[in-house]
Image (cartoon, grey):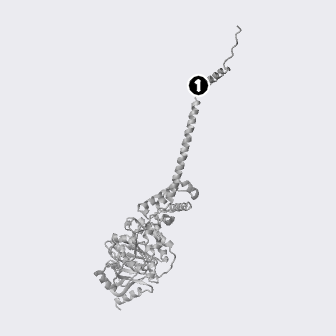
Amino acid sequence: MSDSARFLETVKAGYTFKGESFKMGCAMLDGQVVPGADVLIPFKTLNRHGLIAGATGTGKTKTLQVLAEGLSAASIPVLMMDIKGDLSGIAAAGTVNDKITDRCQKLNLSFTPVACPVDLLTLSNQKGVRLRATVSEFGPVLLSKILGLNDTQGGFVAMIFKYCDDNKLPLLDLKDFIKVLQFVSDEGKAELEKTYGKISTTSTGTILRKVIELQQQGADVFFGEKSFDVDDLMRISEDGRGMVSIVRVTDLQDRPKLFSTFMLQLLAELYASCPEEGDMDKPKLVMIIDEAHLIFQEANEALLQQIETIIKLIRSKGIGIYFCTQNPMDVPASVLAQLGLKVQHALRAFTAADRKVIKQTSENYPETEFYKTEDLITQLGTGEALVTILNEKGIPTPLVHCMLRPPQSRMDILSDIEIDALVSQSKIARKYNEVIDSKSAYEILTEKLDEAAKREEAAKEDEDEGTTEKKSAKKEKGFFDNPVVKSMTRTAGNTIVRTLLGVLGLGGRTRKKSLF
């Protein structure tokens, strides 16, 4: 049997599945597409997560589009993190050209321009459906991990949350949390210590600095109301296709702390709100995270452990997570081990460090007799990749050099006019874009402190008035206590008395009458 025949047999055996699947492309051998060697992706194992990696310009973004199109057509909702701003074209139909026609002929595919049903979401003031979450929804544990607090500081944050729960102080945004933090460090310190224990001013100062650091990255626009309901990420369009929700986070490239905060909260919310599903024929949601290194580069050890735990457990909820990054080493080894689908585009070897990364990357893939993986990674053309996936039994499929199909949606971005039209047609934009400023901890404590200040001012005025009266009385008393005044008073009093008695004929001495 020839190498080509053995290769075709290996691919067919490895990429034939019982359940539903969609065609990603065709396998190649010696640089040529092998007819009939279709590379299929089974929907049943898409909750086992995945990785799309490769250098700039090798076709990662187009692979994301192809993946999203196939999932949407199969009624699987998709959530995409658009860091570079080049994924919005999924909402518009593509156009055919000679290159696309040639590729489709090689892959034995027909090209049908199609636009996916899309909602544009945003974390900031960009156009789109606003994504928000309250501080209370984060909870003390998650918030402490995001802020990078130690156990003592984390315990104090838990105390603050407990105090707010007991005193009906809603924590909606960061200014609520800061106000409570300042209150329990000053005016409310005695009250809090009486019930919950001693408070360290060092801890409160550290926490406040960490919160302000988060604010400096623009977290104020994310914390607040109205909280986004994750069920709105799992909608099916009227024509039966899965909705593609694109989170436009182009302004977060230089704010990785905010991006990782949002991603961790979203993963935690999905995990907490979705029921256990076990093995499903299709995932309920597939999340694709572009420029995934932004999640990990600012993460501390506790945060990485939290992400790893969620990645391990969330697949049982029917949710698949796919990381897209230039260098597969950007993803921690503990997370990388959880990723079933791997699509490796070309890597470039310019330095000794690059060659070392390529060697490590090649060792992460199944061994194959048909390729020298370490060399092939540097020779892949644009729109080509090394592919392996878990089959329905959880076994990795043979590694193949795959020519990927072209996207059927636009391989470019939407114009501002098209974005405006898309947002105006959204069924959830009005629900989340309304500005809500409910009465929360900030307003309640401000009123409480204002009332206390007024009472204190009134008491001070009463005290000042009483002091003035006392001073006046004391002054009068002091005047009459003066010895000179006392003497004058006695003299004047005696004179008045003598005069009155004289008028009545009772005063003065009695003279003896003369005998002569």
Q: Quadrant of residue 357?
A: bottom left
Residue beneath disc 1 = 488
Which residue occupies 58% across, 29% down?
Answer: 482
Which residue occupies 57% across, 38% down?
Answer: 470
Q: Residue furthest bottom?
A: 1
Which residue occupies 55% across, 40% down?
Answer: 467
Q: What percent of the width, then of the height, locates residue 289? A: 41, 72
Closer-to-camera residue (5/457): 457
Closer-to-camera residue (282/354): 282
Residue 387's place in the image compared with 430, above or below, is below
Q: Dot 1, how many residues are within 10 Å of its Cα: few (below 14), some (14-19), or many (20+)?
A: few
Work out whether residue 243 can be spotted. yes
As shown in the figure, which amino acid type bears the numbered disc 1? Met
Q: Quick one: quadrant of the C terminus?
A: top right
Q: Quadrant of residue 167?
A: bottom right
Indicate left or right for 125 with 31 as reference.
right
Q: What percent of the width, then of the height, locates residue 42? A: 43, 83
Q: Residue furthest right?
A: 515
SS under mark 1: helix
Work out whether residue 87 can be spotted. no
Q: Quick one: quadrant of the N terminus?
A: bottom left
Q: Residue furthest left?
A: 98
Residue 487's place in the image compared with 291, above or below, is above
